Amino acid sequence: MKTPAKSPTKAKLSRAFPTLALEILLIESAGGPVCGVDEAGRGPWAGPVSAGAVILNPDDLPEGIDDSKALTHARREALEIEIKARALAWGVGFASVEEIAELNILHATGLAMCRAVEGLAVPPAAALVDGNYRFRLPCEVRTVVGGDGLSLSIAAASILAKTARDRLMVALDAEYPGYGFAGHKGYNAPVHQEALRTLGPCPAHRRSWAPIRALLES
């Protein structure tokens, strides 16, 4: 008696990992170094927005660079060290809660990106920027939707932006205890909501944000 054939199982689609393909194309057209640029912290209720900019060395790439959201905390921190040690240049920039209130989050993000690019030891001829908004930077700009999953330079920048902001939020947790900044990093979370109801906003909160503004006006 024949054993019934097993139904074929659907093969899991493997996720593509970022490469240097976009960088190579842009280096040729721009005629010089290309940096990847990405931000962290556009959505939280507290803390600054940060940005990273990285010019990778194609002959000395750290292994495992990926979108920061796809990595564990420990892996991001390990890769941050390798990226800073082996990249041709890297920079990190911030825009404060006051600048977010004055400029709005979109333009404050652009300011943080500009500061990150200006901090590069090697001036880039062009930048690959994650997303679809063409920020004004001190070089040619090419936007890449989903860039942190396509471009190694953008992925590296996302790691630096995320690790730098996370450390700053841990420092703010010590300065303003009770809100849980070290855990949720300023994002909307039940513990954050409860702390805001109990303690009210602190200077690290984005007072121009609707939920925070509502608390201040109540």
Image (cartoon, grey):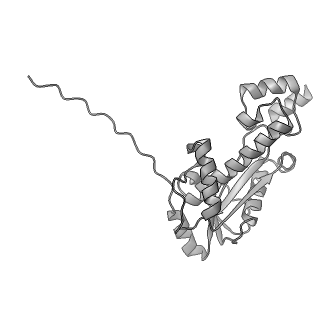
Is residue 131 among the parts visible in the rendering? no
Residue 52, percent from left and from top = 69, 56
In the rendered image, residue 199, in percent from the top left (x then y), is placed at 87, 26
Vertical position of residue 123 compared to residue 214: above or below? below
Quadrant holding the N terminus:
top left
Image quadrant assignment for residue 167: top right
**Residue situated in front as seen by the camera: 177 or 15:** 177
Residue 213 placement (x, y as % from top left): 86, 33
Q: Residue furthest left?
A: 1
Q: Residue at x 86, y 29 (%)?
A: 214
Residue that appears at 60% across and 58% down? 82
Q: Quarter of the image holding residue 2?
A: top left
In this rendering, the answer to whether 157 lies above or below 197 is: below
- Residue positioned 58% across, 46% down in the render: 75
For residue 10, say whether it is visible. Answer: yes
**Outermost residue toward the bottom in this view:** 31
**Looking at the image, residue 81 lies above or below residue 189:** below
Q: Nearer the viewer, residue 65 or 85?
A: 85
Q: Count all numbered tags in the image, as a single digit.
A: 0
Question: With respect to residue 30, does 35 lie above or below?
Answer: above
Which of the image's four quarters has the C terminus?
A: top right
Tell me what residue is drawn at x 71 percent, y 70 percent. 121
